[in-house]
Image (cartoon, rainbow, N blue to C red):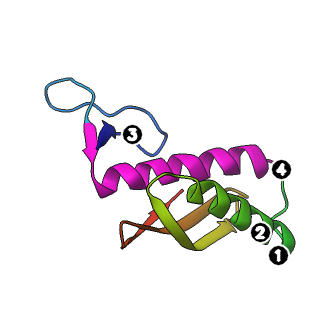
C-alpha cells in the first residue's frame, strides 16, 4: 500500500526526480490517521474553548473517526490539547495489524 507523501500542511512532497513522493507501510497509515484527525479538528474545534468537557468530546469524535479506517483494529488513546495561542493539537495511538502506531496532528 502506498500513497502520496504529504508535509505538515498536507501539501504534496516531491522526490529528487521531481515526481510526487510516495509513502509506504506504517508511514502511509500514520498520514491517513493525521488527515482524519486534522479534518475532524478543523470541523469541530474552530472557536471551541477547550475545557474538560470539550476536550473529552473532541477526543471521542477523533477516536470514532480514526476507528473507521479500514486497517485500524482499536484506538487505545487520543489526547487533544491547546497551546498558548489557542491552536489545538493532538496525539492519536491506533493498533494496525497488531502493531501500535502513534501519530500527531
First along the sequence among labels 3 and 4: 3
* Left or right: where 29 falls relative to 38: left
- Is the residue under label 2 in contact with that under label 3 (CB below 8 Å)? no
Q: CA distance from mark 1 to mark 3?
A: 32 Å
Q: Which residue is mark 2?
A: 55
Please give the name of the residue rendered at 63% of the width and 44% of the height, measured from the top-left corner: 39
Q: Which residue is mark 3?
A: 6
Q: CA distance from mark 2 to mark 1?
A: 5 Å
Q: CA distance from mark 4 to mark 1?
A: 15 Å
First along the sequence among labels 4 and 2: 4
**Residue 99 picture quarter:** bottom left
User: Which label belongs to residue 47?
Assistant: 4
- Is the residue under label 1 in contact with that under label 2 (CB below 8 Å)? yes
The residue closer to the viewer here, 9 or 22, is 22
First along the sequence among labels 3 and 2: 3
With respect to residue 1, does 21 lie above or below? above
Please give the name of the residue rendered at 59% of the width and 53% of the height, measured from the top-left corner: 37
Where residue 51 sits in the image (x, y, percent)?
A: 84, 71
Q: Which residues are magenta?
A: 22-47
Where residue 78 sits in the image (x, y, percent)?
A: 60, 70
Q: CA distance from mark 3 to mark 4?
A: 26 Å
Q: Which label lies toward us, 3 or 4? A: 3
User: Which label belongs to residue 52?
Assistant: 1
Q: CA distance from mark 3 to mark 2?
A: 27 Å
Amino acid at each position: 500500500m502506498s500513497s502520496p507523501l504529504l508535509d505538515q500542511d498536507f501539501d504534496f512532497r516531491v522526490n529528487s526526480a521531481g515526481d510526487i513522493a510516495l509513502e509506504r507501510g506504517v508511514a502511509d497509515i500514520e498520514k491517513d490517521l493525521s488527515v482524519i484527525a486534522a479534518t475532524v479538528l478543523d470541523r469541530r474545534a474552530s472557536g471551541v474553548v477547550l475545557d474538560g468537557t470539550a476536550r473529552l468530546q473532541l477526543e471521542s469524535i477523533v477516536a470514532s473517526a480514526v476507528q473507521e479506517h479500514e486497517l485500524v483494529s482499536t484506538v487505545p488513546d487520543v489526547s487533544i490539547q491547546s497551546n498558548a495561542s489557542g491552536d489545538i493539537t493532538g496525539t492519536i495511538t491506533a493498533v494496525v495489524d497488531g502493531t501500535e502506531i502513534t501519530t500527531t496532528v
